Image (cartoon, rainbow, N blue to C red):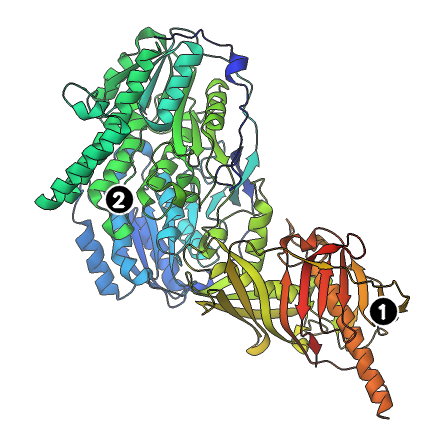
Amino acid sequence: MTLKEPITLAEALAPPVVDYPEDGSVRPVRRHVWEPVETAALPPGAAPGLRGRSIAVVGGREATAAAVGAALTAAGATVHRLAPPAGGQYGGFTEAAAALYAAAGRIDGIVDLNVEESFDRSGPDGWEGPFRQTFAMLQACFADWITETDAVRLFYLPVTWLGGRMGFGPDRIEQPLGGLWAGLAKGLPREVPNCNIRILDLTAEHSAEEIGELVSRELYRWGAFEIGHHAGRRYSLRARHAQPAPPVRALRPGDTVVMSGGGRGIGYALARSLAEEFGARVVVSGRGAAPDADATPALTLNEQDFRRYRDERLREAVAARRVPQVRGELEKLAQERELWANLSAAREDGLRIDYVQCDITDPEQVARLVDEAGDRLAGVVHNAGVDVPVRLPGKTEQIVSLVVRVKVGGFLNLLRAVADRPPLAFFCSVGSLTGRWGGMVGQLDYGAANEALSRLGLWASQGGEQPGRARRTPVSTVCWPTWERLGMITNYEATLRYMSAVDVREGLYHWKRELFSGGSGESTFIGDVGPAMLPSVLRGYQQDTGLPGIERLAASRYYLGEPLEFRPYGAITTAHLLSAGELPCCDDFRVDGEPALPVSLCLEYLRAAGDWVLPENGDQLRFAELRDLDVDLRELRVGPGRRTAALVRHAEGRWAEDGAWRVAVVLERDGRRLATAELVYRAGEVPPETALLPPTGALGAEDVAPPAPGGALAWTGHAFRLAAWQRDAVGGRLYGRAEPGRTADLLLASPAPGSTLPLNQVENLLRAAWFAQAQAQAQAQAQAGAGAGAGGARRLTVERLSAAPSAAAGAVLLIGTPDGRDWTGQYPVELFEACPVVLRATGLRYR
């Protein structure tokens, strides 16, 4: 037995040195807190999109439901009422929801009033009947909703009663259980990709008529997921990067920490850290009895022997046709083996980690668990959780109730058990990003339970009198991403598509800082957002936050536009309303003397469409090139009388015979074709290309003057950084040095969206090609005796265009053939040495 001396607080809270893997699967996380911020008011009156819709109004008080129904009906919708369950009713929801759906014929959206009573009236179990009813209504709609490609039609809007600022203001939180419906809503687009959501948070002071009016105004005006109304003002939530307060107290030898769960996964990692570093006693718990190696010899098998044992059991199960049952038994045995190994290791190392059998959903068992701590109870960690990842149609009432009871019921039982004890050093709930942003497919109930846990923590911590609460108890809720291969992980690789994992040592470092800071509220730890993004989800991200990677998300959101149709992994149609007043670059580029959308920005709109129609599990595909571009230059104009341009973009992907994924993109304006192109994606990184730098200028060169302003195409240089051009005196090649540009100079958006294509370099290339070809045309006309015209252009075609990711990072030497049709962009190194080729265009013609 090895017993270590406790270490100092400074040593325990020293940041770990982590060697992060190069594949980006594990990344540093940053701590963020959430705060309500006032946001723009909506136009008065109901949303026009309500006309003709068929809407179910579920739960809530009859007076509120009637007012909501009246407001929706006045806006042209048809309303169908699903009354709340009677007190104590926990069954019959599936039949009632199916009957309502059959009578309605179709349901376009759900307004969910859920539990409207305050928490002191509904009680801690008041969620169960209404929540089961919500699931039943969603399941009744699922077969229709999952096949819907219309990105506008469907919605789910729950109303919560958290004070009008989502529980983050200094308000009375009337019903903290509303967090269940908020978390459910944020996970729903993962199950139904074209379901739009809006969580509407209100106060108890809102009248039924005001609620009806606000619901009718918020629908079909999508954006931020969560919107609150308080004292006549409209709020959303914003993330702010913040460090925890300095530690106010550490654990002392003999102090006791009680944990729900804690025998396995991240809970055990924390329990061991607290016991080892501070000499604390940690009481962990679980629903089952402590594992007994005498009764279950398989607990002591090494990994190789256990694999043999498992395989033999499965072979016997196949013969007996009991495979599902035996798989369940083996999974339970694997969990018991982990628990047994952890407890054995703790004993061998002399750590006081004691296991107590406790069903966290049983108040009496929880009271006994807390009593086990004696009079040295210093802190409580609510770590228990159950995740049963099943898609919405397969979620039974029993599964949903179990998942929620462990998180919600367990928290309330622990809070009640410590109510008469002296104040604790910490009370910490373990939440998840599945609650804050929605979970993976199959985690609707788990995300809902975690979001309810966060809102209950706010309610417990809030100052002043709160309904259903005996006293204030500061609660900190930590919302984690996946920990690196530790904890409740069904498919580790799948979780990385949503967000990078956190290193275990780094997670423990952040967790201990939270415990000892004496703070309360929700702390969210965020790494790098993964590629598993949907249009309906992206619109819910606030653009003015301090989230890591917000620049990339902001760019995706900007070029996304407003989705009209969406078929995951296949096709998307979006609308884009472009205003010259918000695009300074339109005053830089002109077509026939009128301000116009620059071609380079048009290309970025075309390219960005491909991001949304990559095949399933197509994360390894990389944009390789753009082919067969055809642009109607006249349709780019946004000049006098046309200061706005309403565009519609359609993209559709398919596999090609050469193994590439090809996306056909069409950009239209008022039904007329503005541009078409094909995007090519290939697996793996695009191999770098190098070429010898031609001896441009070595044998003499002459400056090339662009056409005078007023021609068919013109650039002023106010937004784009225009290059000076020369023509090789011998070979006739064109060359110029194009500096990198900033999208902030081109677009009035905050944060300014980046681009995949190097816009400034591409625009300079297009400009040089134009004046080369216009000059050649003028010379040809002069030789033919037709007179030198200004050089007209109606179309631009490009056979191929490709750009390396690094093309926008620095100055690029652009080199074009004498006719301006073929171009390379290179990072110059030395004459006659191979230089990186970062930009290439072939077959470029103005017609």
Q: Nearer the viewer, residue 723 or 687?
A: 687
Could you tell me which secondary element the residue under label 1 belongs to? strand
Find disc 1 in the rendering and name its residue: 727
Q: Is residue 425 above or below residue 37?
A: above
Q: Relative to 679, is 295 on the left or the right?
A: left
Q: Which residue ends up furthest to the bottom in the rendered image? A: 785
Q: Which of labels 2 and 1 is toward the front? A: 1
Residue at the spot 54% in from the left edge and 46% down from the top edge: 542
> Residue 625 location, x and y as percent?
59, 64
7 versus 522 height, above or below: above
Mark 2: few/some/many CA within 10 Å (<14, 14-19, 20+): many
Q: Which mark is residue 791?
A: none
Q: Residue at x 62, y 56 (%)?
A: 756
Q: From the image, which quarter does the N terminus lie in?
A: top left
Task: Look at the image and tell me whether residue 40 can be seen.
Answer: no
Kind of residue indicated by mark 2: Pro
In this view of the protein, which residue sits in the foreground, 192 or 57? 192
**Residue 476 appears at what percent x and percent y?**
44, 26
Q: How many marks?
A: 2
Left/right of residue 716 with respect to residue 41 in the rendered view? right
Residue 356 lies in quadrant: top left
The percent position of residue 678, horizontal first and vertical second, equals 55, 70
Disc 1 crowd rating (10 Å Cα; few below 14, some 14-19, many 20+) is: many
Q: Quick check: 837 above or below 654?
A: above
In this view, the residue in front, 710 or 154, is: 710
Mark 1 or mark 2, which is nearer the start of the sequence? 2
- The image's mark for residue 130 is 2
